[in-house]
Image (spheres, rainbow, N blue to C red):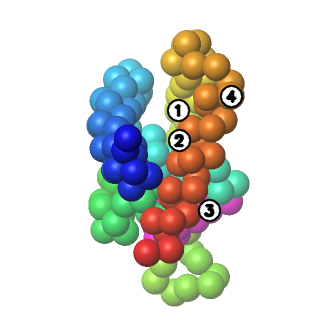
């Protein structure tokens, strides 16, 4: 019988696999809008915050480096999907907000994603989904403390 640590490792490996598959799926979902899953994640972090956020805040939500997030934000700014605003709390760290065009694209993607998620959840009962979400939250909290 596997120890808890061995099962934890198996979950981590499965999460790596799922992460790669989700990036591929995300790229396919966003392709018609000329986006990538990385850009979609940035948009999602801004929308979920419900207010303009810094690149550092976006990178924490995405679990990526600030530098990688900054590169994506810079391209999105040039493409007119996000705008950089002065931050009253910091001279250098600009706030990032969706433009009107970015909000329109995100809304379309959100509707498309809802259908995709409903289809993906069809063969998983609610109890399993809730347990998986709970376990992943606990794993994330552990890793954030490191």
Q: How far is the residue under mark 3 from the one under mark 2?
A: 13 Å
What element does badge 2 sit on?
helix
Left or right: 54 in relation to 73: right
The answer to which image quadrant residue 115 occupies is top right
As for residue 24 lying within the magenta part, the answer is no
Give the position of the N terminus as an image quadrant: top left
Q: Earlier in the sequence, mark 2 or mark 4?
A: 2
Which label sits in the foreground, 3 or 4? 4
Say which residue label 2 marks: 102
Q: Is residue 98 visible?
A: no
Residue density around tag 3, few if under 14, some if 14–19, many if 20 or more, within 10 Å: many
Q: Label 2 near label 1: C-beta < 8 Å?
A: yes
Q: Is residue 19 above or below residue 68?
A: above
Please name the residue shown 37% across and 60% down the image.
64
Residue 105 is marked as: 1
Q: Please tell me how crowded label 2 is: few (under 14), some (14-19), or many (20+) other residues with Cα within 10 Å.
A: some
Residue that badge 3 annotates: 52
Tell me if 116 is positioned left or right of 2 in this view: right
Which region is colored magenta?
A: 51-58
Q: CA distance from mark 3 to mark 4?
A: 35 Å
């Amino acid at each position: 019988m596997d120890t808890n640590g061995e099962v934890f490792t198996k979950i981590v490996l499965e999460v790596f696999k799922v992460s790669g598959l989700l990036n591929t799926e995300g790229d396919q979902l966003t392709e018609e809008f000329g986006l990538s899953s990385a850009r979609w994640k940035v948009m999602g972090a801004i929308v979920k915050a419900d207010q303009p956020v810094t690149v550092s805040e976006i990178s924490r939500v995405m679990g990526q480096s600030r530098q990688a997030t900054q590169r994506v934000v810079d391209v999105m700014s040039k493409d007119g999907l996000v705008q950089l605003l002065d931050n009253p709390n910091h001279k250098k760290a600009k706030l990032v907000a969706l433009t009107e065009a970015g909000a329109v694209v995100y809304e379309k993607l959100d509707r498309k994603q809802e259908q995709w998620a409903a289809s993906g959840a069809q063969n998983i009962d609610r109890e399993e989904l809730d347990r998986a979400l709970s376990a992943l939250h606990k794993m994330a909290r552990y890793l954030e403390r490191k």
